[in-house]
């Protein structure tokens, strides 16, 4: 926890979490200057044209906001003017390994909270307007320059009828120009307004922050799939009634007793979170190996080259379980340290592993959840 972290400008994790996380903004000059091959507009355009990728095009012209959701055709993007628009592409880390490597560098925070790396590209004047996010975000500038204004204002009233959540009023507290490699951290609901001064990109590292309503709804879905309540409604002692349209007190009492059978404890909640936090989004699919290895070939390749998670895969673990892509894995207890290492490092080193682990890994390999190098 006391180790200096390069992407925090040499600050250690304990200091960052104590003084800034969900408390105050932080500007970090030259946080990540080496981002590998930048994802240019041509590559973003190709991703935005796919139906398995979430994308948006935002324009602001003549005091009006316009939003188009992908897939976005190459013909449409070719007609864009020289200024005043932004294209945003979600989860680029699912498609480019070196972008995924940037996301997983934020390993001083729980992977259970880490969401995705979105890339936005904008020419001069491109903006998504003054707004706030409901989650923590790191904004990394890649190429070009961008002016960021931020505000700790309490007024979060939005423009009526706008297709985006644009703040009615924005009173900047601080203004910075970010160049390549500079990064800005913002806590949830901290108002900010970015405008591109030169063509460039913002890599947005976002964190999951489900609403209470979403968590409750998903927990009830989880319970629904696992409930098994025997018996059925019965009223053998029903008495004659004068008002057939009334829902009787006896029925209310009997149903109330039925519902009291729905119970949960800490273990139930822990298991729910393992499933929920690793569940892929609806548009995510995995590709099985094109040339499938048999189990012996797989074990040999694992021994020689090791294994890495697919870019779209997530493994999390608890004291009692290991979860991958929305499912609880059946594992041998002796294999638990290897699964935890895979979850933490997203790869396994080359080596000879127990048969129980190799068999389980082979099954995931066939589904495209991870790959031997």
Image (cartoon, rainbow, N blue to C red):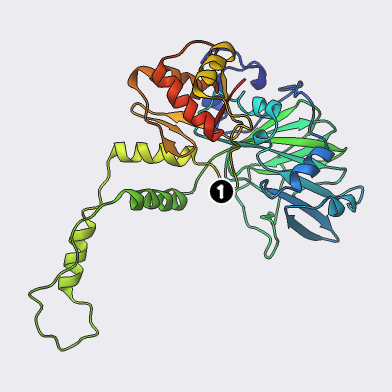
Residue occupying the point 19% across, 67% down: 233
Q: x%, y% of residue 284?
A: 59, 43
Q: Is residue 158 above or below residue 5?
A: below
Residue occupying the point 68% across, 46% down: 53
Q: Tell me the residue that label 1 is attached to.
A: 282
**Relative side of 47 to 294, left or right:** right
Residue occupying the point 86% across, 46% down: 125
Q: x%, y% of residue 244?
A: 21, 86
Q: Is residue 51 above or below residue 188?
A: below
- Depth order, front residue of 209/306: 306
Can residue 111 be seen from the camera position used here?
A: no
- Depth order, front residue of 34/17: 34
Quarter of the image that includes the C terminus: top right
Q: x%, y% of residue 38?
A: 79, 29
Q: Is residue 353 above or below residue 171?
A: above
Choose top left, top right, bottom left or bottom right for residue 318. top left
């Amino acid at each position: 926890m006391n180790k200096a972290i390069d992407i925090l400008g040499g600050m250690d994790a304990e200091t960052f979490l104590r003084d800034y996380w969900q408390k105050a903004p932080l500007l970090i000059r030259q946080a990540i200057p080496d981002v590998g091959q930048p994802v240019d507009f041509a590559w973003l355009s190709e991703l935005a044209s796919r139906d398995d990728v979430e994308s948006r095009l935002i324009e602001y012209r003549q005091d009006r906001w316009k939003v188009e959701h992908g897939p976005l055709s190459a013909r449409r993007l070719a007609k864009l003017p020289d200024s005043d628009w932004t294209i945003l592409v979600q989860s680029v880390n699912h498609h480019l390994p070196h972008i995924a490597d940037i996301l997983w560098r934020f390993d001083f925070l729980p992977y259970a909270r880490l969401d995705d790396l979105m890339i936005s590209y904008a020419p001069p004047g491109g903006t998504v307007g003054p707004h706030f996010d409901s989650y923590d975000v790191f904004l990394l500038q890649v190429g070009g320059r961008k002016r960021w204004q931020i505000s700790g204002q309490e007024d979060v009233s939005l423009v009526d009828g706008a297709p985006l959540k644009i703040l009615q009023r924005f009173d900047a507290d601080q203004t910075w120009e970010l160049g390549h490699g500079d990064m800005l951290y913002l806590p949830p609901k901290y108002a900010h307004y970015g405008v591109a001064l030169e063509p460039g990109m913002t890599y947005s590292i976002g964190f999951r922050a489900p609403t209470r309503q979403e968590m409750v709804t998903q927990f009830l879905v989880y319970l629904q799939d696992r409930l098994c309540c025997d018996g059925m409604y019965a009223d053998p002692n029903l008495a004659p009634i004068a008002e057939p349209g009334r829902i009787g007190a006896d029925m209310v009492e009997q149903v109330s007793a039925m519902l009291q059978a729905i119970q949960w404890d800490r273990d139930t909640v822990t298991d729910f979170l393992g499933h929920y936090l690793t569940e892929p989004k609806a548009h995510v699919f995995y590709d099985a190996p094109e040339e499938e290895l048999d189990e012996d070939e797989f074990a040999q390749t694992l021994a020689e080259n090791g294994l890495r998670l697919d870019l779209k895969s997530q493994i999390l673990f608890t004291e009692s379980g290991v979860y991958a892509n929305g499912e609880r894995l059946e594992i041998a207890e002796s294999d638990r340290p290897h699964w935890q290492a895979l979850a933490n490092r997203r790869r396994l080193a080359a080596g000879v592993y127990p048969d129980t682990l190799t068999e389980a890994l082979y099954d995931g390999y066939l589904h495209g959840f991870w790959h031997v190098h």
